[in-house]
Amino acid sequence: MTVDLSADVGEGFGAYRAADDAALLRVVSSANIACGFHAGDPGIMHTTVAECVRLGVGVGAHPGLPDREGFGRRTMALSRHEVYTYVLCQLGALDAFARVHGTRIRHVTPHGQLGNVAVSDVDWAEAIVDAVRDFDASLAVVALEGALTKAARSAGLPVAVLGIADRAYREDGSLVARSSPGAVITAEREVTERVVRMATDGVVRAITGRDIALRPDTVLLHGDTPGSVDLARAVRAALTSAGVGIEPLAARL
């Protein structure tokens, strides 16, 4: 059994930082790097890609909505064409830094509300897929099961199922809204037990207490979750103890 362990990184701006990226990148096998819309800037992208290359961490794009103030987590009324161009623009931005550092983007993981809406909105899902396909059809689309994974498979793109370590699930497989109690999980024991069950048993416990099917290709830890570095270390140790190997997403696919 193997799984990719990933984290959202590069989600700062100027002097502001959302997480200890340097520490996280020493734990994970793949990185989802903010591309400048919801967070990130040229300097941060440059530094983050360079550190990924130095540590052998897989580089992934983490495009979001143009919503810095809301960290890409607010709903926006966007056309299909706008979603397409926003994603394409962010892929191109991160690709420039990947090329300079002698690597390439391996996967795309939509951030926040961009990813949440695309789970159920066919237009947004197909717009994201069109942008990825037109940019580089070898890139894996990483997402919760739903409209986006369905559209990606239909377009012949590689698909990786996402499991989120520190977020609560509803019985339909969607995430509990961040505004709801219990949506973000920070207790180390609960997080590690959930991730091990995902990787070994292919299930996760929904907020109702019922187990639902989920066997992820990659397990995500949000960098801005309180205690994210300690959680990442605990998750990696728990997976190893359970006999689950950690390998970059590109190797799994």
Image (cartoon, rainbow, N blue to C red):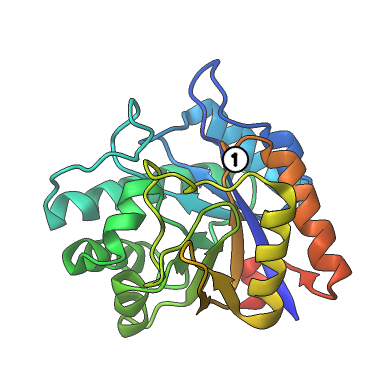
User: Identity of the amino acid at label 1?
Assistant: Gly
Q: Dot 1 surroundings within 10 Å: few (below 14), some, or many (20 or more)? A: many
Left/right of residue 221 with respect to residue 68 in the rendered view: right
Q: Residue at x 48, y 23 (%)?
A: 13
The residue labelled by disc 1 is 223
Q: Position of residue 228 (x, y in %)?
A: 67, 40
Is 114 in front, or is 190?
Answer: 190
Q: How many marks?
A: 1
Q: Secondary structure at mark 1?
A: loop
- The correct choice, above or below, for 171 with respect to 48 in the image is below
Q: Position of residue 251 (x, y in %)?
A: 68, 73
- The correct choice, above or below, for 14 with respect to 228 in the image is above
Q: Position of residue 208 (x, y in %)?
A: 46, 65
- Residue 116 visible to an observer of this rendering: yes
- The correct choice, above or below, for 209 with respect to 25 in the image is below
Query: Quick one: which residue is furthest to the top in this view?
Result: 15
Query: Quick one: which residue is furthest to the front in this view?
Result: 209
Q: Residue at x 30, y 33 (%)?
A: 67
Q: Quadrant of the N terminus?
A: bottom right
Is 162 in front, or is 241?
Answer: 241
Q: Quadrant of the C terminus?
A: bottom right
